[in-house]
Amino acid sequence: MNVLGIETSCDETAASVVQDGRVVLSDVVASQILVHAQYGGVVPEVASRQHVATIVPVVRRALDEAKLTWSQLDGIAVTCGPGLVGALLVGVETAKALGQALGKPMVGVNHLAGHLAAVYLEDPSLPEPPPTPHLALLVSGGHTELIRVDGNGVYRVVGATRDDAAGEAFDKVGKMLGLGYPGGVQIDRLSTQGDPNAYALPRALAGRDDIDFSFSGLKTAVSTLLQARRAVAGDAALAPPEGAELANMAASVQAAIVDVLVRKSRRALVREGLKDLVVCGGVAANRGLRRGLAAAAAEDGFRLFIPPPKRCTDNAAMIAAAGTRALERGARAPLDLAVDPGLPL
Ligand code: KG4
Ligand code: ZN
């Protein structure tokens, strides 16, 4: 079964063809990061216009690279939420038009279910897919959730952030430190040169018995740190941190976020009686998080399944994988499929 996946929920225009929900025949991602970076974050209207301009060439390339003709497709899967409403509309209307013109079944995919399905795509680093039930840590720009996965499409959120998502925390603090967008990638890069213990930053809710998160206090802590630094220098116009000082701040921020994510994942695995942890979403590309979880897995004896970095950040292969699973369950989207910017898992 060859399924075309289409993803336009935020700032990546992506299309991919996946065979049998597992073999990636093509994986095209046109990133808009350079366009949005000049504004310091994603501008929704600009994102929509970029999607309109790139969607058709991106879909064509996905077909070409898969070496397939339109008639060899068996279905179309498209992200219908959550995300930016105008951006989602571009993908959904494209999928509807293709589905109608080709006479192929179409299915709407929840972007979060897409992230959760990235782990089923074939990759040398993932010799086998995770069994169910398993626990998933979904960490992206908009979401931070611990999810119990009991089967194909059967999910239960067992822990979540009370305020900012982990990716949002990375990006907002990155902005405060004068780093480019997206801050998560820059903080990951700088962290390799810094001391994670240089600054004592809060680990919110860490001591509590629950498996929820809170990252908004980190912004306040970093802001206080920067203010204190200005007070010491006695100069309101002091330049932003750089060199070793910047690297130490980045490493300390990353350590604070990673610490909590690792700690709560461990606790959730015990509480749910599970032995397999899937990690997905853009922040799962973070090297500090991957290292921290690998160490915890070795110590606690759980198995870790993390897709390669390019399948953690937004892509359409994961949407095709989730779509294939939905088509297998018999799901079909009507022609009036709506987008839902706040679609829950
Ligand atoms: O899953 P994703 O591509 O889009 C959403 O669904 O939100 O996640 C994007 C988020 C951004 O906040 C970005 O800063 C973060 O993932 N991210 C990272 C890294 N790569 C992407 N955060 C930390 N370290 C990284 N290497
Ligand atoms: Zn995403």
Image (tube, rainbow, N blue to C red):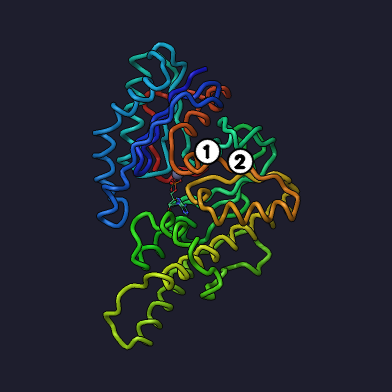
Query: Where is residue 344 drawn, in percent x and y?
Result: 49, 44
What residue would you read off at disc 2? 155
Earlier in the chain: of badge 1 and badge 2, it is 1
Which residue occupies 60% across, 54% down?
291
Q: Given the image, on which type of amino acid does mark 2 rest?
A: Tyr
Residue 7 relative to residue 284: left or right: left
- Within 10 Å of disc 2 (Cα), the crowding (few <14, some 14-19, many 20+) is some
Residue at 33% across / 58% down in the picture?
180
Tell me: residue 178, above or below residue 297. Answer: below
Q: The disc labelled 1 sits on which kind of residue?
A: Ala
Q: Is residue 211 left or right of residue 106?
A: right
Q: Is residue 98 left or right of residue 253?
A: left
Quickly name the residue at label 1.
Answer: 113
Tell which of 249 and 95 is nearer to you: 249
Asked if the residues shown at circle 1 and circle 2 are in contact, with their CB atoms under 8 angstroms apart, the answer is yes
Residue 269 locus on image (x, y percent): 70, 51
Q: Please name whichever residue, 15 or 80, is drawn nearer the observer in this view of the structure.
A: 15
- Asked if disc 1 is less than 8 Å from ligand 2, the answer is no
